[in-house]
Amino acid sequence: MATKLVSAKEKQLREEEEDGMNLEETLVDGHDPEPPELHPESYRMNSADEMRLLAIADNFQRQYSLLYPDRKPLLLCPANECGVKKFVSTTVRPTTTSHCELLTWQGCASFLADFLPLEPLEPPVDLPRQLSSSTSVLRRQRATCFESATLLCSLLLGVNYDAYCVSGYAVREMCLLDQSLQQCPLLDTEAKSEIGEQERQENKYTVKPLRELKSRFLTQQEKKQQEAEAALLLGQTLKERESEQRPADFLRGLRVHCWVLVLSGSHSVQENFFIDPLTGSSYPTDSDNFLGIESVWNNLNYYVNMQDCSNGCSEMVFDLEDLRMWEPVLYGATSKKQLILDVLKRKERKMMSITSSEEEEEQPRVFQMPRSWVSYITISKKDLETRWPEGKKVTHYRKAKLERFVPCLNPDGLITRLTTYKDLDCTEVTAVKQWYKYRNDNLEETQINKTDNFTSERFRRGRAFHLLFHRWRSLPTGTERLMEFSSAHIEYLVRRVLSPSEMEEYFQGRSDFLCYRRVVFKPPDQRSEPSYLQTDLENLHVQTVVEHFDRNASKPANEDLAKRVFQVAQDRIKLTFHLMDHRFFPSKRCFQKPRPGQKFTQALVSTFQVDQSEVPLTTLNLNRMLNELIKEEDKVALQIQRSLKEVNDIVACREQEEKEVELWTTSIAAAAARRERKQRELMAAQEKRWHQQQERDVMAPLLIRLGNPEVLSPEEAQQLYESCLSEFRERLEEKTNLLQQSYEKETMQLQSEQQRFQQSQHHLTQEDMQDYRKTCADKTLQIAAIQKRLNRHTETVQDKYDALDQKLRQDPRLAAHLKA
């Protein structure tokens, strides 16, 4: 086959590329863990289209520098990890993923921000000389802002976002990933959730409280005091702000940064916005953090910004089709909008059954962006689970430190810890909040508040005692505890507050309609040693017990108990009944217990009856009622004793659980883990088979250009057939040329060594003679190997071409439309 002619500029670029392949010094950073020879062929050399694109980019860079000498050079053709120059747009590889977490920009940005620690640019005002592929970045798990943005853009393009990498300038804190002056987003989320709960509770249909009567003078005094406190707080805040202000950045406006631009119109995006790949956060396009833009690019084209950025990006127009605002490197190349329009037109023509003769004449073909040289980007389930390097990530915010851990890394199940501080130097801790996962005691969250001196724990449903929340703090007289329970509690208890002086309990859904109980204990100095043989309120050091009951609709209101009070010291029991309709006061009854040996009489009972038509109860009925109340008092004493014992049991249980913390190791959890692992392996195998099929499908790249139609027309099938054979012929010719050039290069080097030896052989030492013989032997071996590869390739070229032709003719998508 005839050798394909290339321009002088392309020859020069190819020679530079081969020199870079043979010399490791062309690697800029040299931090790629794999040697160049282990990378795919597309990493180590350029195709004919890539060589032509490099020539176009070099010409564009020269014209740009000539027309705009005051502007910095553009990032067009940095070297990859093998030292080979690649156009930046071909480094973007649109990638689809089967992970649900990576189907939105939030999931992609959050994962990459966690997975890729920052490798700062050095110096910070210059563009990087090297841009590694996304596959290498994922393997070494470290990236510059340009490499992170490239990988994020590739993932977003794969899920149909109209995304672009942006090269420009940003503030110091964003370039250096310094978040120490920002509010922790976890604190913002908690504050918003609390506000949302308050708003939900404040319903407009809720009955408004009665107007509170208050003195105007007292109101004015309170207002003055609040204003004074606010002024004092504002002064403290201003002092803090002044103290936290850092020295001016002398490189402001010069620090280079790369981020991602997402345009509206695709994936339900309504407005353009930026994504910082280092933090995973989104920003509006007029954000003050971004100080200017030099260029944007994706896998289809490269655009240079022609707008004024003296005021940042606030007034920029992101219509990339406007040639007055954006200068493309490839004129007439396909854009995202054109692809969408072409697909819609093709579908419309098929629906209207328009033949090719009726279609408009096609425009002449222009040079399109070559396909990406980067291998398929794969993100494993393990990468999603581990996320952070070494299993943890620490982020410092304003007066806060956020630590995140891989699940099951810590033996106590800790996955997140948020520490807040009182001062900007983060020396005085105010609170520590921790989140857990997979614990056998169902613990989900703990908080230690050193300002209010309390500790709290929050649990998942299903643990012992049906406990959901436990908070306690130490007082001079003892410990105050707050406990919340699920509805599965045996006593239908939902909340309990216990202090040394009293205990409050809240119930829900009880058959006796009890909803609240308050127990007041005697002061510690008035208590005596309890007797464990007796169970009464006096023995429990109880002064008063107050109980409230919900309305029982099966009873009349004046017979339905609403409130019951046991006054132990006075031997008195007070009853209050529910309010009757159209009444302002409820009925009441008070019993005085008879002393030992005293006979019960009507004088021991005082009654307030609202309905005067009701017949008063007889002495016998009142006596029976008192006896029932005394029995109820004993039951209440037994319930209070059980409550106090339950509190002690819960505390003892929690102490024991903290000593024996275990993560889920039950057979059920193990079986679930095995099922999940098998499912992941099955999905991985299916995904691998699909990728192999896509790699074997030689028509896949060309079908993408046609919009992946389900059914091909005869014209499209013929065009696809000819394009496949044409591109394959070019690849064969390109490989022949490269082998021939390598053969000639090695032969010339051997001849040069021999000539040098002939000229200086009389002055060579024994070591020089040995080096010469070794060099000649190596060169001869290399020349023989290249000659053998060239001969084998030349002999099999026609067979490979015929095999591809036969494969295309047998393909069911083309067979029906090709002539035999």
Image (cartoon, grey):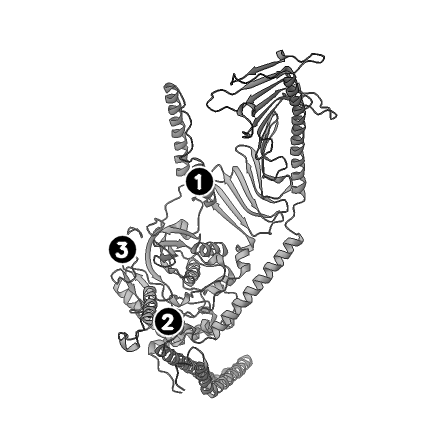
Is any atom of residue 758 visible in this view? Answer: no
**Residue 767 appears left or right of 215:** right
Residue labelled with disc 2 = 705
Identified by mark 3, the residue type is: Asp
Q: Which mark is residue 598?
A: none
Give the camera-side residue of 274 and 73.
274
Local SS, label 2:
helix
Q: Which numbered disc flags the more N-terminal residue, 1 or 3?
A: 1
- Looking at the image, do the residues carrying marks 1 and 3 touch, with CB atoms under 8 Å apart? no
Quarter assignment of residue 434: top right
| Residue at 65% across, 41% down | 464
Identified by mark 2, the residue type is: Arg
Residue labelled with disc 1 = 196
CA–CA distance between discs 1 and 3? 42 Å
Residue labelled with disc 3 = 308
Is any atom of residue 729 visible in this view? Answer: yes
| Residue at 54% across, 60% down | 381
Foreground mark, 2 or 1, reads 1
Q: Count of labels shown?
A: 3
Local SS, label 1:
helix
Q: Which numbered disc flags the more N-terminal residue, 2 or 1?
A: 1
Instruction: Give the x, y percent position of residue 499.
Output: 60, 28
Above or below for 773 versus 614: below
Give the camera-side residue of 285 and 645.
645
Instruction: Give the x, y percent position of residue 700.
Output: 43, 73
| Crowd around label 2: few <14 · some 14–19 · many ≥20 (10 Å) | few
Q: Which numbered disc flags the more N-terminal residue, 2 or 3?
A: 3
Give the camera-side residue of 579 and 98.
579
| Crowd around label 3: few <14 · some 14–19 · many ≥20 (10 Å) | few
CA–CA distance between discs 2 and 1? 48 Å
